[in-house]
Image (cartoon, grey):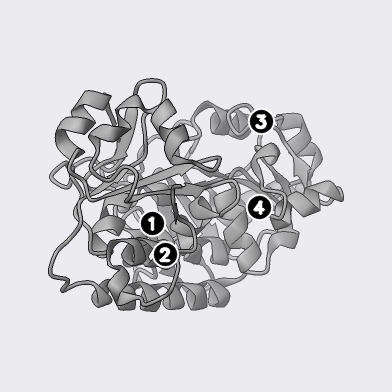
Amino acid sequence: MNSRFKLLVLALAVILCACSRRQASSSVAGGTDMAPEAKYLTLIQQDDCVMAEVSTPWSGGKPIATYRIDKPLERSVVFSSVYTAAIDELGAIGCVAGVADGAYFVPDDTVARLMANGRIADVGSSMSPMVEKIIDLDADAVLVSAMEGGASAQLVQSGIPVIYLADYLEETPLARAEWIKFIGLLYGRGEAADSVWNNVRREYTLLRDRVANVGSRPVVLTEKPMSGVWYVPGGHSYMARLIADAGGKYPWDADTSTGSLPLDEGGVIDRASEADVWLIKDARDITASGLLAEVPHAKAFKAYPAATYFCNTVEKPFFNSVAFHPERVLRDYAMIFHPEKFGDAKPQYFEKIK
């Protein structure tokens, strides 16, 4: 392990053996939680540092990792464009030396431009990263999702400090967005992160209140089948909450899961054929004829084609926005569900199929 790795292990104090994912028996004592919205993140200000705890729905309320943050990261490797987008917004993209899955960054993304001129390296797949390349980058730490599994264990076994993020497991959009505070603290941009968070919370609340008392709520269907399986958000997922906060009604709102529900097409038709709006995300543009060719039963849905909308996620940064700027996605949804509330304004991410 190089000297920078040793320093960071001391600076971040990765108290738990994250590679084994054993639950901790104690939690950070003292102080007020600086991230009260987030269910799976605790940030406690202490005299000379901030202590951060990360947990998951499967850890029984106990942390899977605890970090002592008393100096900012100077060189890091980041395994998701969602996190690099937040780091870039906070003005710390110069502290990113490498990323995983570089081919998936859209051409006009800051990271894509920096990769093109050699300032950021692509360390390969997030599922099977090039560990030696990460070591050669002399990185302080690697930021990964809490579900990277074998890949993160491989990094830890190689002596590379790993920082887990579990934002995507949160049940509400604002809870997920609050994780930008953790990212800000890691990169010495705590005040900037607080400013972003405060603006997000204010705008989200204003939009939610704007449609809170609508007379009717359109039923909203999402996505389309992939290889015979139709994955829809669980009833307690942050995507289901976004629909509700935008003045919509979700067909699976009684479900208690926070992840995706794998359904067959017949089950979706039974539950949502009368949906008023159909929202689809894809890595390409979608036309009415193209959707019908791909989903022959599309005509079984009342929303096809007049109230069917798509988002091209290659051209538009939907996934980056939904994580740390849910107010932008909420505005799109609210505009589609209740256009009378927004005059001539147009959605940012979604457009009606033609």
Report whether residue 324 is seen.
Answer: yes
Give the spatial CA distance, label 3 vs label 1.
Answer: 26 Å
Q: Nearer the viewer, mark 3 or mark 1?
A: 3
Tell me if mark 3 has few (under 14), some (14-19) or many (20+) residues whose alpha carbon lies within 10 angstroms of its own.
Answer: many
Image position, residue 110 (x, y; %): 72, 57
Residues tagged 4 and 1 counted as in contact (Cβ below 8 A)? no
Q: Name the element at disc 2.
A: loop
Q: Which residue is mark 2?
A: 178
Mark linked to residue 8: 4
Image position, residue 322 (x, y; %): 44, 56
Give the spatial CA distance, label 3 vs label 2.
Answer: 28 Å
Q: Name the element at disc 4.
A: helix
Tell me if mark 4 has few (under 14), some (14-19) or many (20+) residues whose alpha carbon lies within 10 angstroms of its own.
Answer: many
Give the spatial CA distance, label 2 vs label 4.
Answer: 24 Å
Image position, residue 299 (x, y; %): 28, 34
The three-letter code of the residue at mark 1 reads Leu
Q: Which of the two discs, 4 and 3, labels the residue nearer the N terminus? A: 4
Q: Which of the two discs, 3 and 1, labels the residue nearer the N terminus? A: 1
Residues tagged 2 and 1 counted as in contact (Cβ below 8 A)? yes
Q: Which of the two discs, 2 and 4, labels the residue nearer the N terminus? A: 4
Q: Nearer the viewer, mark 2 or mark 1?
A: 2
Q: Which of the two discs, 2 and 1, labels the residue nearer the N terminus? A: 1
Image position, residue 103 (x, y; %): 69, 38
Q: Which residue is mark 3?
A: 129
Q: Which of the two discs, 3 and 2, labels the residue nearer the N terminus? A: 3
